[in-house]
């Protein structure tokens, strides 16, 4: 019932009355992802921006504060405050870059890696179980659909506006 109410509210917005049910289902998945992120951040004892920073370091590896700021979409000054907070909490470390010893990069700590794993692993395993049960045809369809949806979202993120339908 909550989905129906939420979907009716979305369709009540200007220009969205004719949204496809599948579009609303994608919106529901995005919303569930946001809620999972909030719960995981809470479990790790941090806010969602801090958790996003730790997640980016886990996904992309060590990077400088400038790179982290760009990926988070926040200012260099805000990133410095964020990194100071994460360092005090034991989630990140500032280390010398192995390629350029003059450069300092950020890396997640083993404790942050374990907390991140504990927060996300059960859901990732459950999603993997669902995906592993797909037939070859279902998997091919799902991969194609998800890739096209991701590309649409990336285009929207690059343009700074919503992608066209």
Image (spheres, rainbow, N blue to C red):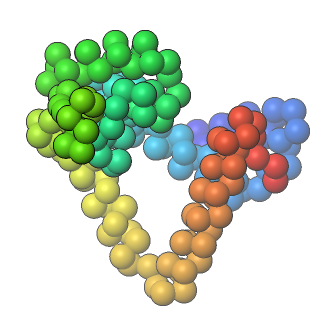
Q: Position of residue 6 (x, y in %)?
A: 65, 37
Q: Position of residue 10 (x, y in %)?
A: 74, 37
Quarter of the view holding residue 116: top left
**Residue 111 visible to an observer of this rendering:** yes
Q: Residue at x 87, y 33 (%)?
A: 14
Q: Residue at x 53, y 40 (%)?
A: 31
Q: Nearer the viewer, residue 95 or 70?
A: 95
Q: Position of residue 123 (x, y in %)?
A: 31, 53
Quarter of the view holding residue 133: bottom left
In the image: residue 20, left or right of residue 95? right
In the image: residue 136, left or right of residue 125? right
Q: Position of residue 3 (x, y in %)?
A: 61, 43
Is 139 rendered above or below residue 129?
below
In the image: residue 40, left or right of residue 155? left
Is 77 rendered above or below residue 138?
above
Q: Residue at x 20, y 27 (%)?
A: 94
**Residue 106 visible to an observer of this rendering:** no
Is 147 rendered above or below residue 118?
below
In the image: residue 21, left or right of residue 96? right
Outermost bottom residue: 136
Q: Nearer the viewer, residue 69 or 149?
A: 69
Q: Residue at x 75, y 36 (%)?
A: 161
Q: Quadrant of the N terminus?
A: top right
Quarter of the view holding residue 130: bottom left
Circle count = 0
């Amino acid at each position: 019932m909550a989905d129906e109410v939420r979907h009716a509210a979305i369709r009540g917005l200007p220009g969205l009355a004719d949204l496809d049910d599948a579009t609303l289902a994608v919106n529901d998945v995005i919303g569930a992802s946001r809620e999972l992120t909030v719960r995981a951040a809470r479990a790790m004892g941090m806010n969602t921006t801090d958790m996003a920073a730790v997640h980016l370091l886990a996904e992309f590896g060590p990077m400088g504060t400038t790179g982290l700021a760009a990926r988070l979409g926040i200012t260099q000054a805000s990133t410095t405050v964020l990194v100071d907070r994460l360092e005090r909490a034991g989630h990140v470390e500032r280390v010398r870059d192995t390629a350029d010893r003059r450069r300092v990069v950020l890396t997640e700590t083993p404790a942050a890696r374990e907390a991140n794993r504990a927060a996300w692993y059960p859901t990732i395993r459950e999603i993997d179980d669902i995906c592993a049960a797909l037939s070859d045809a279902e998997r091919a369809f799902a991969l194609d659909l998800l890739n096209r949806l991701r590309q649409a979202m990336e285009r929207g993120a690059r343009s700074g506006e919503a992608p066209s339908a």
